[in-house]
Image (cartoon, rainbow, N blue to C red):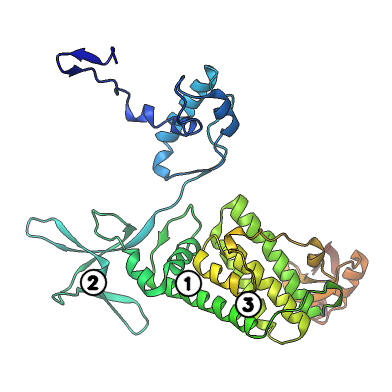
Amino acid sequence: PAFSDLGDGWTRETDTFDTFMESSWYYARFCSPNYDKGMLDPAAANYWLPVDQYIGGIEHAILHLLYARFFHKLLRDVGLVNSPEPFKQLLTQGMVLADTYYRDDEKGGKVWIAPADVIVERDEKGHAVGAVHKEDGLPVIAGGVTKMSKSKNNGIDPQSIIDAHGADTVRLFMMFAAPPEQSLEWSDSAVEGAHRFLKRLWRLVNEQVAGGAAPALDASSLSDAQKGLRRKTHETITKVSDDISRRLTFNTAIAAVMELLNDVSRQNDEEPQTRAARQEALEAAVVMLAPIVPHICHTLWEALGHKGPVVDAHWPVADESAMVRSEIQVVLQVNGKVRAKADVPADISKADLEALALGNENVMRFTEGATVRKVIVVPGKLVNVVAN
């Protein structure tokens, strides 16, 4: 107080550091926000740091991140932290893009018009051929697709989409439309596609529930089709777990669940073990989608017979034994071009695989009159017959 109070109503300004100085070590201070004996509590900082995942825009790459690394190394040199870098992993998310429209004003400037106030005219193939203002029906100029901004007046109010389709639809669209590090182009039709997928998920679960409680799964008594669905379930668990936790590619995680639901749709008989395998697949799908579309998954999880909320459910763990294949599909090539595919035992020998390829009708047709020079066998994948 004595330092800042100069008397006669004057107070010394003590907040004199540049903004970049103050914003370069906030993550470290978060570890001990109430510590009053110094900048950081070293014990707390070293317990929590470095940050596991940093998410920030690309504009931080040449300013904030450089400063943060510089100050972190400074903090290390004075003994406040012991890690060499502030962040373990960096994700720079892309921008959300949207169409822009404008009119020229009398002074040669542009008056930007919100997409919601524009009617786009399309030809019979759906291609945009013009645009007019909703109020006066007069033409507006398309300014192309660019990032949403106040200056271009091309922001989309998500509330109208939420009112029409629900918050889960908006969340699903934004996570599925593009990898997080790439720009996302807003599309009303894609939003509708996300809504259709959620309705399909809802229908599949309710069809399953309508059949009554599913029996316990007996892995030893499954038919080939039932084993195939169970294998797809656990392959999907493996992929989605890696996509979300390591790769941060939420769009491919969602795509994998969509593929799983395609298989669920095909297994539509009411055999007891089909229903059991389908129950396992749907439960896994609901849990894996819950971080992205939590509201619908909360309801569907209860519908599937669980009393606790889905947010408390354990993440599914892949069963390695379920993913073992008795048969695999191999590609048969002639001079590097695919000429056939064949389903073979998973443990087939190289010699038998070579013999199978040479005896294949299509392979024989494309090597007729030629001399086989070499047969390249890649176990579990392909056979390439080189002939001339």
- Left or right of 200? Residue 341 is right
Please state, as top left, top right, bottom left or bottom right, where the C terminus lies in the image: bottom right
Please, is residue 123 above or below residue 44 in the view?
A: below
Instruction: Report which residue position mark 1 lands on.
Output: 194
Q: Residue at x 26, y 69 (%)?
A: 116
Element on which disc 1 rests: helix
Q: CA distance from mark 3 to mark 1?
A: 15 Å
**Which label sits on residue 118?**
2
Residue type beneath disc 1: Ala
In the rendered structure, the answer to whether residue 224 lies left or right of residue 69 reads right
Element type where label 2 sits in the image:
strand
Q: Earlier in the sequence, mark 3 or mark 2?
A: 2
- Is 19 situated left or right of 342 in this image? left
Residue 346 placement (x, y as % from top left): 86, 68
Q: Position of residue 13 (x, y in %)?
A: 25, 20
| 73 to 87, vertically: above or below | above
Count the labels in the image: 3
Q: Could you give the CA–CA distance between mark 3 and mark 2, rounded to whole angstroms?
A: 37 Å
Q: CA distance from mark 2 to mark 1?
A: 24 Å
Q: Residue at x 51, y 57 (%)?
A: 179
Answer above or below: position of 250 versus 267.
above
Label whose residue precedes the other's in the sequence (3 or 1): 1
Would residue 84 be seen by someone viewing this image from the given angle? no
- In the depicted view, which residue is nearer to us: 106 or 334? 106
Label 2 with label 1: CB-CB less than 8 Å: no
Residue topped by disc 3: 262
At numbered mark 3, what does the secondary structure look like: helix, strand or loop? helix
